[in-house]
Amino acid sequence: MRAPFLIPLPLPHIGSVNAWLLRGDPLTLIDTGPCDDEAMSALEVGLRAAGHRVEDIELVLITHHHLDHSGLAATIAARSGGRIAAYGPAAAYGRDYDARNEADRRFSLALMRHHGVSDEVLADTEVFWNFIRDKSQPYDADIELADGESIRAGGRDLRVVARPGHSTTDALLVDERERIAFVGDHLLAKISSNTEVYPALEPNGTRPRARVEYLESLRQTAAMPLIRLHTGHGEDITAHAELVRRRLADHERRCERIVEAMHEGRTNAFEIACGLWPAKTVFDQTLLVVWEVLGHLDLLLDAGRVEETVTDDGSRYGLASFALAGTTTHAP
Ligand SMILES: [Zn+2]
C-alpha cells in the first residue's frame, strides 16, 4: 500500500492546511484547502508531483465542514467529474453552507453580547465571518456517510467515526487494517484544537456543551489502536494516547486558571478572558478566546464547581458554594 501523499496548501492567517492524496482506486483527495486561487495552484503543483492532475480525482472526502477542509470540494468535483463524500452532518452543512454560516454568525453575535463583549469589540469580529464567506463554497455531497459506515477510498476501506467537538461535523476516517486515521482538526500535534460554540441543532434546544463533548471524543480516540494520525495542520501524530493525556491535563490547568480569575472577581466570560490573555490577543481573536473560556466554564459547570446565573443582561458565573468550602472536584 502506498503511503498517503501529503499536499500542503496555503491558508491565509493560519499558515497551511494538509490535503492527502490516496493513490489507489478510486483516486481520492482528503480535504481540499480554502476556496481561492493560491490553494488551487498549490494543489495542482502537489498533484503533479504525485503524477496526477485535478481532473484525475475520483473522490473528494472531507473531514469536517470548515472552509480550509472543504473550500475547493465543489470546484474539484466540477473539474474532475469526481464524487464528494462526507459524514452526514458535514454533508448537510455543505448543501446549505451560506445560510448555515450566516446563522452561525448571528448566533455568535448574540452569544458574545450575552457573555459581556461590547458592540464595539464585536464589530471587529466581522472580519472573521467575512473571511469564512470569502474562502468557502457550498458543496453537494454525492455520498452521505453514517457514523460507522465504510467507504472505499484510494485502495483502502476507510471507516467514518464521528468525533464532535472541534466542530459539529468532525469525523475521523480510519483505515483499520493499517491502523492509521485521517483526523482533520480533531487532534493536532503542536496546538490544542479550539471548539466552536454553536447553536442548538433543534429549534428551542439548549446549546450543546461543545468542550464537554470534545473531551469525550478525545478519550474515545485515545482508546483506539492507531499507530499514526494524519492531521489537518502540521505533522503526523504517532503517540496519540499520550498526546490526549497531555491535552486533558492542559484543560485541567486552564480550568484552574479560570477559577483563579473568578477569585479575582471576574464574573463573565469576557472579563475572564481579559484576565487570561494579553489585551491584544483578546481584541484580535475575541471569538476564539471567548469560545475557549465558555468551553472551560462548561467543563467547570459539568463538574459542579461553577454556577451560572442567567439574566436579561447576560450570564454571570460564580464558584459553587461547596467549591468555596474547599471541596476538590477535578474538572474532567
Ligand atoms: Zn482546519
Image: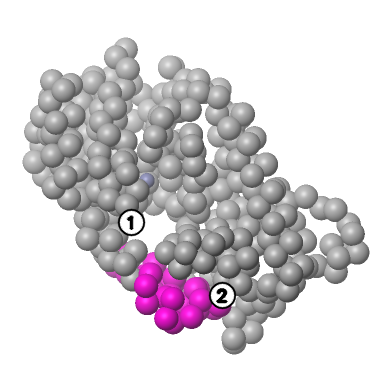
The residue beneath circle 2 is: 115
Residue neighbourhood size for the residue with mark 2, other residues' Cα within 10 Å, grouped as few (<14), some (14–19), many (≥20): many
Residue most toward the bottom? 312
At label 2, the amino acid type is His
**Residue 176 place in picture, x, y as percent:** 45, 22
Horizontal side of residue 114 vs 301, given as left or right = left
At label 1, the amino acid type is Tyr
| Residue depth check, mark 1 versus mark 2: number of the one nearer the observer | 2
Q: Quadrant of residue 177?
A: top left
Alpha carbon separation for disc pair 1 and 2: 26 Å
Indicate the secondary structure of the residue bearing disc 1. Answer: helix
Above or below 26: residue 121: below
The main secondary structure of the magenta stretch is helix
**Residue 171 place in picture, x, y as percent:** 43, 41
**Residue 215 place in picture, x, y as percent:** 60, 46
Count of marks overlaid on the render: 2
**Residue 110 place in picture, x, y as percent:** 47, 77
The residue beneath circle 1 is: 93
Q: Quadrant of residue 98?
A: bottom left
Q: Is residue 318 magenta?
A: no
* Towards the viewer: 151 or 274: 274
Indicate the secondary structure of the residue bearing disc 2. Answer: loop
Q: Quadrant of residue 84?
A: top left
Residue at 18% from the left image edge and 36% from the top image edge: 43
* Towards the viewer: 157 or 182: 182
Which range of residues does the magenta coloring cover? 99-125
Above or below 116: residue 6: above
